[in-house]
Image (cartoon, rainbow, N blue to C red):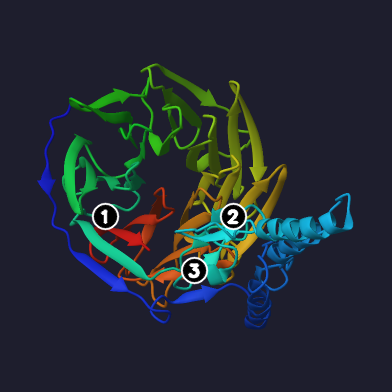
Amino acid sequence: MKSLRIVVLFVVSMVWTLGASACASGDIGPQNAAQTEEDARDDDEQTGRDTWSGASDASDGGVDVSLDTTDTATDTRLDAALLDTGADSGPSGSDSGQQDSGASDADSGSTDPCASVDCADGVCDPSTGQCVGCLSDNDCANGGRCHDREPVCVPACCNSVTQQDSFSSVSYSHNRFDIAVDSTGAPAIAFVDGDTDKIEFAQSINGQWLSQEVGSVSNSLSTNIRMAYAPDDTPHIIVGRYQMLTHFWRDQSGWQSHSLLASPGSVGYVDIVADDQGTIHMVALIDYGAEVLYATHNAQGQRSDEYLTLPAQNPPVWVNLDATSDGRPVASFHIGLDKTVVLAERNAGTWAYETVGQGVSQVHGMAVDAANQPVVAYHKETNDGLRLLRREAQTWRDDLIVADPAHGYSPDVAVDSLGDPHVVYMAQGATQTDNPLYYARWNGAQWEHHQLPGVDRAFYPRIALDATRTPHVAVYDPSRDAIAYLLVQ
């Protein structure tokens, strides 16, 4: 058990309230196509909901947006009105006339299911009589959009970006940090301090960052670290470096550790995730990818491990790990010389493999969406910008998010409860020391991307989402020798 040391870190908070001009957002695709789609969308918002096809248009370098202009609300009211004929089958003319009047009044009172519904938040859906978040963009405040698949308002981005240089003078953290958010929405960052060779866990509590020493390494160079929260908010960390692969977790008595490496080997990139049942899944590349170790630690404390055999002649050089809602692990491996991604999915104890993508960058992001389907964010190495691979049933869709080839480096991705991806990435600026940080998302109608302020050089950004779909970002900025935390709202 490691001793616990708590220090209050110096936090410098900077809050930008960004207007439309300060956010530096960019619409995707040619200007004329984007304007045409926007005009069509404005017309449709008065009467119905837009539907995004999600197909990419390779010819114009943008995302093709198709609109469904069916006026569902008006059709529902018309159908209800047609049912109200006022007819009555009374036995006599006088009775019929008197009963017609009463029946008509009763019917007219029931034609609008929203007549007696008072929605404190949102609007009433006339097709169901239930309160929903929105039916059109007009129902969303402050420039928000009504989502194309769910009656939920997507807030406009990015009205406020709060940045905190949470950890200064950490000496070339590079890829040696990660971010996660607990069930209360509080962010935490695990990192290896290059100055002290200490493994640190820092958590924001009531807006104040507190740090604990988890352990140490003999040399922080070539050390890789990832973290995840279990459903009970227990933090779990995996650390890999030369002949070291250790799982750390915190219980009531402090930080505990377990070595995952049965025999000596050089450990490369690692990842860790907790599923909804509380099982911790871990993966590591051993001996430069010659071996791939997968290990688990369930809620009862039982452990297991096995080695994977990937269907590729060349070894993997990057790995991501996630889990489905029913606890199945999904891993993505970048095959270096092939520039492809191998997806590995475990079901009933058996691994299935699938090779996807062409010209995929080494550093890519992978997450599982609400439908338990993998999503891969990557930069295509043919001057093609930021792209997103997404599996729908058995078909893969390859969408172009940002056409500018200077965008999309070192992407990380998270998927929210609506099934929408959120991507953070680095862009190439005008000089070698200018690497701005960007955030891209689907806003309910189209892809948009924004430069996040205050970060001069954005190395290996990481993203986590809380229950409100709010992005929390961690990034290493070598120009300030600091790991910066950003809350994007």
Residue type at the position of mark 2? Glu
175 and 326: which is toward the camera? 326
Q: How many angstroms separate mark 1 from mark 3 (CA)?
A: 39 Å
Residue 150, labelled with which disc?
2
Graded by Cα atoms within 10 Å as few (under 14), some (14 to 19) or many (20 or more), the crowding at tag 2 reads some
Q: Earlier in the sequence, mark 1 or mark 2?
A: 2
Residue 364, labelled with which disc?
none
Viewer-side label of 1, 3: 3
The x, y position of residue 100, in whole percent, is 79, 58
State the SS at label 3. loop
Q: How many angstroms separate mark 2 from mark 3 (CA)?
A: 14 Å
State the SS at label 2. loop
Using the rendered image of the protein, determine whether residue 87 is visible from the camera's viewpoint.
no
242 and 172: which is toward the camera? 172
Question: Pointer 1: what residue?
Answer: 172
Residue at 53 percent of width and 40 percent of height: 316
Residue at 76 percent of width and 62 percent of height: 81
Q: How many angstroms separate mark 1 from mark 2 (CA)?
A: 43 Å
Q: Earlier in the sequence, mark 1 or mark 3?
A: 3
Question: Pointer 3: what residue?
Answer: 144
